[in-house]
Amino acid sequence: MRAERDGSACQAALDELTRRSKDGGNLLEAAVEAARMRASVGEISMAMEKEFGRHRAEVKTLAGVYGAAYEGDEGFAAIQKSIEDFTEEEGRRPRILVVKMGQDGHDRGAKVIATAFADIGFDVDVGPLFQTPAEAAQDAIDNDVHVIGISSQAAGHKTLAPQLVQELKAQGAGDILVICGGVIPQQDYQFLYDSGVKAIFGPGTNIPEGAQDVLKLIREARS
């Protein structure tokens, strides 16, 4: 039978963990003792965070690699021309925010898309890992993007994508398009479309063709 949590004993164990973080000592031992007192993983992390702070993953992308690989490709040249035409018409480049939400830390695909779209001619912003839908929506509004691209590799799409769409609407930014890419089962596509997602790009998508599709969506939304 699971023992009842003793609030005062649990807090004392967490305080000891914080003290050791500051003054030195065996943190693993203190963390195990806090867990025995029924402290949650979040509480244990917070106890150490008071002294050490929180790690923030730095997202880095490269420029020029994708463009160099597609040099001379007709499809790549065509989408670059389309971007130039859009820029001339609208006075700015199409802008996309690539986001990773929830506990999905698999960001290689997101970086590939961010790099490729930047080489194609999009203005690209990349959100930090582990964002909430509310944080991603606020970033999109602050950066005045046309599109948010959700990169999903950890099966959170049926929860996170609809929440992001609703957050945008709640903040008066329902005109920002939401698209998805990554490992998403075909049987989930209609659910996402019904939830407000405008396009889904699965593994193996031709990136220049996908970029043309995204640009088409932006044009349609603005007209």
Image: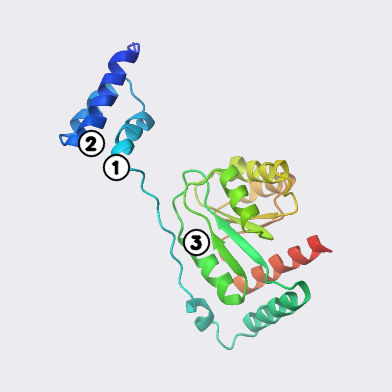
Q: Secondary structure at mark 1?
A: helix
Label 3 packing within 10 angstroms: few (<14), some (14-19), many (20+) = some
Which circle's residue, 1 or 2, is located before the other in the chain?
2
Q: Are marks 1 and 2 in contact (CB under 8 Å)?
A: yes
Residue 70, image x, y percentages: 55, 82
Q: Residue furthest left?
A: 25
Determine the residue positioned at 23% across, 26% down. 16
Identify residue for label 1: 52
Q: CA distance from mark 1 to mark 3?
A: 31 Å
Q: Position of residue 21 (x, y in %)?
A: 23, 36
Per the image, label 3 sits on a secondary structure element best described as: helix
- Residue on which disc 2 sits: 21
Q: Nearer the viewer, residue 172 or 157?
A: 172
Q: Total number of numbered labels?
A: 3
> Can the viewer see residue 37 in this picture?
no
Q: Amino acid at mark 1?
A: Phe
Q: Is residue 17 left or right of residue 200?
A: left
Question: Which mark sits nearer the N-terminus, 3 or 2?
Answer: 2
Residue 5: quarter of image? top left
The kind of residue on which mark 3 rests is: Gly
Residue 73 visible at all = yes
Q: Nearer the viewer, mark 1 or mark 3?
A: 1
The vertical placement of 111 against 44, above or below, is below
Residue receiving disc 3: 109
Q: Residues within 10 Å of mark 2 (few under 14, many from 20)?
A: some
Quarter placement of the C terminus: bottom right
Residue 195's tag is: none
